[in-house]
Image (cartoon, rainbow, N blue to C red):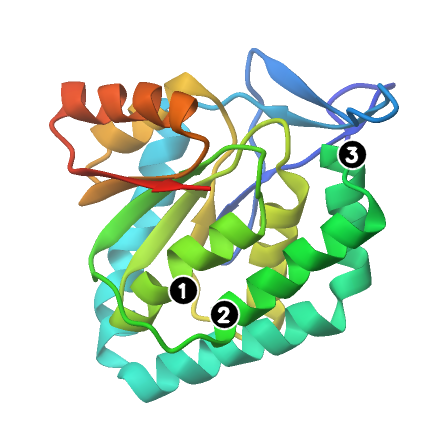
């Protein structure tokens, strides 16, 4: 999808099992740090998009939890297998967004595959995950897998600097026949995080470097939302 006649392609949101298109007042250009090239762009979303994403996760949560852990384990393993099959594609996305070399990008994908195959069990509920650009795919998989195994549903807010692999993973979950609404994604920055808190998630989780995590935690504290930081 193009939001302008010229310029990089925009990455939409992923809500309730499909791409969710929205037009916002502002966009963020995703720039390859190694080349300076603007490779993609994302809409900077806010409260209305957050409400849509969280609402989808809330509707899906009870049925996902009732599926039972063995069925959820099959879903996660299927997604891990699919990610492994498309490892070259995901590595390329990481190289474009983050400027990673091929070895680092491949290691990032391998870590994500391993996390999706892990049988750890975390907390259930409906939660929002905020990521920085340091480990945009492995950090995502490591944070969501235990919660999804427990029966949680999630809204992911990737870094606007590195959104492509997270969005592609959501697309891959649909190809792996995941129930709609279990894994959702919204684009944006601070306003998106504030919107997720206002939409009524059970907790806010941050995965990345501590400096940004402190800022995200402050937003959660102001909103009265439980907060967890996973340091990359």
Q: Which residue is mark 2?
A: 116
Distance from disc 1 to disc 3, alpha carbons, whole Å, reads 26 Å
Query: Residue 97 — which label?
Result: none
Q: Mark 1 or mark 2: name the one nearer the start of the chain.
A: 2
Crowding around mark 3 (Cα neighbors within 10 Å: few <14, some 14 to 19, many 20+) is some
User: Residue 182: in sight, yes or no?
Assistant: no
Q: Mark 3 or mark 2: name the one nearer the start of the chain.
A: 3
Which one is in front in this view, the residue at disc 3 or the one at disc 2?
Answer: 3
Quadrant of the image containing the N terminus? top right
Which one is in front in this view, the residue at disc 1 or the one at disc 3?
Answer: 3
Residue, far left: 224
Circle 3 — which element? loop
Which picture quadrant has residue 180?
bottom left
Circle 2 — which element? helix
Q: Is residue 88 left or right of residue 55?
A: right
Distance from disc 1 to disc 2, alpha carbons, whole Å, reads 6 Å
41 to 125, vertically: above or below: above
Q: Which residue is mark 1?
A: 145
Query: Residue 99 — which label?
Result: 3
Which picture quadrant has residue 22?
top right
């Amino acid at each position: 999808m193009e939001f302008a006649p010229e310029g990089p392609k925009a990455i939409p949101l992923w809500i309730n099992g499909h791409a969710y298109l929205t037009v916002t007042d502002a966009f963020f250009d995703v720039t390859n740090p190694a080349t300076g090239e603007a490779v993609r762009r994302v809409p900077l979303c806010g409260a209305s998009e957050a409400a849509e994403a969280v609402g989808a996760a809330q509707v899906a949560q009870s049925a996902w939890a009732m599926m039972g852990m063995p069925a959820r384990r099959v879903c996660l393993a299927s997604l891990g297998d699919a990610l492994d099959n498309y490892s070259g594609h995901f590595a390329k996305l990481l190289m474009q967004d983050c400027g990673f070399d091929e070895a680092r990008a491949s290691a990032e994908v391998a870590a994500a595959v391993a996390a999706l195959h892990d049988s750890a069990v975390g907390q259930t509920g409906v939660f929002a995950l905020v990521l920085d650009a340091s480990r945009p795919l492995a950090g995502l998989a490591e944070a969501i897998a235990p919660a999804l195994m427990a029966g949680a549903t999630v809204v992911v807010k990737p870094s606007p600097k590195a959104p492509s692999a997270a969005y592609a993973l959501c697309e891959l979950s649909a190809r792996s026949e995941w129930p709609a609404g279990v894994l959702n994604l919204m684009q944006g920055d601070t306003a998106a995080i504030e919107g997720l808190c206002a939409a009524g998630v059970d907790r806010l989780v941050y995965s990345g470097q501590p400096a940004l995590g402190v800022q995200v935690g402050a937003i959660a504290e102001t909103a009265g939302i439980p907060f967890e930081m996973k340091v990359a």
